[in-house]
């Protein structure tokens, strides 16, 4: 059986080959840290998994109005010891949306290293967020959970065109649209 860190390192390299960015280097360095980067108790920073949760027709994405951050973002959360971040993305999408029958693509769709400000007794720290495409395959009637102020299906093209949207959301929207324009069917 292959070591999970080796699998993630290879997936990060494959992502970097398709979407050149220097950011992936920081992610691979985190894998080499002797302190477990898959648990939130690593206060300097840790891995998280997020879902680019697309509708069945591939034209909308489900976003959360994040309760703690007060911003519209993709669904996601802490790895909590899970080393397969695609499973983290799927778990978080299911928990935060109440949707069932979701599927996840194993390839990395996007990565983003972002600062989480101090909150209560928790110091500020880095999230090394690995994002995967998760697809709604059945009913798209979501349930707003405790972690969200609201959820909404949002047109992906509108996100890409909105200069006021979160930059990482705009990047993922552009990536999704480019992917469909290059022959990869967005509904499959």
Image: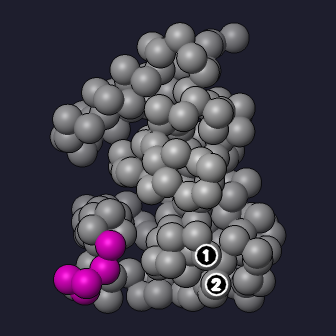
Closer to the camera, 61 or 120? 120
Closer to the camera, 136 or 21? 21
Tell me if 26 is positioned left or right of 145 in this view.
left
Closer to the camera, 58 or 79? 79
Q: Residues within 10 Å of mark 1 (few under 14, many from 20)?
A: some
Which residue lies under the disc numbered 2? 149
Colouring convention used in this rendered image of the protein: one colour
Label 1 sits on a secondary structure element that is loop
Label 2 sits on a secondary structure element that is strand
Residue 113: percent from the left, percent from the top?
36, 46
Tell me if 99 is positioned left or right of 148 in this view.
right
Q: Are marks 1 and 2 in contact (CB under 8 Å)?
A: yes
Quarter of the rendering containing residue 170: bottom left
Tell me if 173 is positioned left or right of 141 in this view.
left
Q: Residues within 10 Å of mark 2 (few under 14, many from 20)?
A: some
> Label 1 to label 2, Cα distance in Å?
5 Å
Q: Visible in this render: residue 173?
A: no
Q: Give the residue drawn at x 55%, y 81%.
A: 65
Residue 81: percent from the left, percent from the top?
71, 32
Magenta residues, start to end: 162-166
Residue 181: percent from the left, percent from the top?
26, 69
Magenta stretch, main secondary structure, is: loop
Classify the position of the N terminus by image quarter. top right
Residue closest to the far front: 121
Q: Is residue 63 magenta?
A: no
Q: Visible in this render: residue 141?
A: yes
Please tell me whether residue 96 is drawn above or below residue 138 in the rendered image.
above
Quarter of the rendering containing residue 140: bottom right
Which residue lies under the disc numbered 1? 67
């Amino acid at each position: 059986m292959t070591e999970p860190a080796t699998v993630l390192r290879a997936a990060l390299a494959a992502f970097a080959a398709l979407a050149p960015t220097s950011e992936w280097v920081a992610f691979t360095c985190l894998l080499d840290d002797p302190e477990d980067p898959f648990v939130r108790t690593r206060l300097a920073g840790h891995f998280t998994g997020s879902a680019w949760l697309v509708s069945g027709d591939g034209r909308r994405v489900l976003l959360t109005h994040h309760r703690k951050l007060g911003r519209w973002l993709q669904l996601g959360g802490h790895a909590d010891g899970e080393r397969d971040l695609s499973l983290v993305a799927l778990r978080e999408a299911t928990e935060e949306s109440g949707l069932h029958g979701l599927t996840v693509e194993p390839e990395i769709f996007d990565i983003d290293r972002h600062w989480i400000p101090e909150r209560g007794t928790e110091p500020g720290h880095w999230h090394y967020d690995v994002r995967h495409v998760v697809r709604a395959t059945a009913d798209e009637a979501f349930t707003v959970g405790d972690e969200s102020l609201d959820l909404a299906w949002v047109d992906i093209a509108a996100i890409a065109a909105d200069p006021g949207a979160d930059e990482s959301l705009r990047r993922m929207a552009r990536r999704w649209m480019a992917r469909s324009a290059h022959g990869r069917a967005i509904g499959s």
